[in-house]
Amino acid sequence: MGTGRAPDRASPEVSFIGADEEPFDPSTEDEGVARTQTYAAIIIVVLVVATVAVALTIERPETEVKRSDWAYDMTQLESAWEAGMRGQGVRVGIVDTGIDADHPVLKDASVVAWLDLVNDRQEPYDDVGHGTAMASIIAGHSPLRGGAVDVELIIVKVLDHAQGFSDTIVADGIDFCMDPDGDGDYSDGADIISLSLGGEYDNIDILLGTKTEAAIAQAISHGIVCVAAAGNDGSADDVSMPSRIPEVISVGALDRWGQMAPFSSPGNTSEPRLDPDKKLEVVAPGVDIVTAYNDGLHAKGSGTSHATAFTTAVLAVALAAAPDLKHDGAEGGNVTSVKRVKTALMETAKPLEGQISPHDPKSGYGLIQAVDLIVALKA
């Protein structure tokens, strides 16, 4: 698959520190041995980890893979699957580290457009593993079936182990998701853009701000729903960029027991934000999630990145059931349609036990619910 158009872009301006250990080769490991791959704290992190490390347990590819069924159950994605709601006809843009399209879990996923803004390679790949993990939550197949397996994917690689990304590169990635062939016709673009990345808006060393914000504003003006990770710094005074942008859906993480993950960044209540744009907006599973990983491996990881992918899947199955609200639908293509989808997502979210109602800066409006959202959008 070719790269399509290649937007003008600056060299990466932010560094990325890769893993401390490489994934193990199962042919050289003793039976039952698993390795842990730890990502160090970095200036700006595709895993959305500002000050903490994340461990991914890389398991042997031939071992039995245990899907995180609880996560799909608690978000009603499993119920949506059983009802035949699987994201048909919806396009999802993933701006991340790429995708291992040959992975057994993803080889049957539909990748309709690809752009490498790091190394200009023509075919999809992922030398980090994070984008592959996110794609598997959204569109993976057996044994790690995702929440919206029938979506079409637009994949943009904006980061690798050696280089970080800049405001320009992320903005260019969003632009590509809107118009993959660059012909000015957005009908072949994404209905949803998933951004499991982030950084500080006002830090001069982290240039993820005005260009990204402008690109997202343009996407939303064309009816494209944008979802971004809240961040993995539980002591932060606000969610990270780009989830800080009002119309973007900012997603926090919880565990299988419905408890907020301590690393999940909260919103800032002192900001003059109104419903449905108070931060963060919703929460989704993001602790000990089993995903695909590079080279046929699978991993267990935690983060608001994972929660963002689950929310993307929920939105995809909902838009498939209510196609008039897609960016090229009869009622879509504008800010109003995005706000309608976002408001319905907030109103159908399930409040967590003990949360401040109707909005809590830690858990937002509550846990995403796929079937309830579908019902609301079709009403």
Image (cartoon, helix red, strand yellow):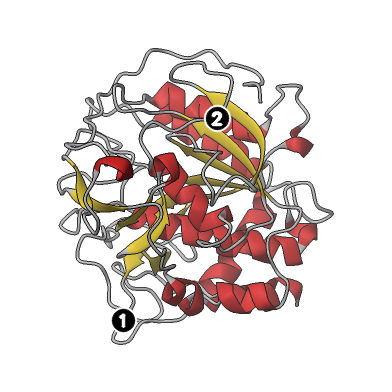
Residue at the image point whose x is 70% and y is 47% from the top: 334
Q: Amino acid at mark 2?
A: Pro
Binning the other alpha carbons within 10 Å of mark 1 as few (below 14), some (14 to 19) or many (20 upward) gives: few
Q: Amino acid at mark 1?
A: Trp
Residue 173 image position (x, y, % from top left): 52, 29
Which mark is on residue 124? Answer: 2
Horizontal relation, residue 236 to residue 65: left or right: left
Residue at the image point whose x is 33% and y is 73% from the top: 360
Q: Residue furthest bottom?
A: 353
Residue sitting nearer the eye, 94 or 57:
57
Query: As displayed, is residue 134 above or below residue 162?
Result: below
Q: Which residue is mark 1?
A: 257
Residue 16 image position (x, y, % from top left): 25, 28
> Quadrant of the image for the C terminus?
bottom right
Horizontal relation, residue 370 to residue 61: left or right: right
Q: Secondary structure at mark 1?
A: loop
Horizontal relation, residue 241 to residue 195: left or right: left
> Quadrant of the image for the N terminus?
top right
**Res. 323 in view:** yes
Query: As displayed, is residue 118 above or below residue 373?
Result: above
Query: As displayed, is residue 103 above or below residue 282?
Result: above
Where is residue 184, by image quadrant? top right
In contact (CB < 8 Å): disc 2 and disc 1 = no
Q: Nearer the viewer, mark 2 or mark 1?
A: 2
Residue at the image point whose x is 58% and y is 57% from the top: 141
Where is residue 186, by image quadrant? top right
Residue 227 image position (x, y, % from top left): 49, 51
Q: Secondary structure at mark 2?
A: loop
Which mark is on residue 291? Answer: none
Sequence-wise first label, 2 or 1: 2
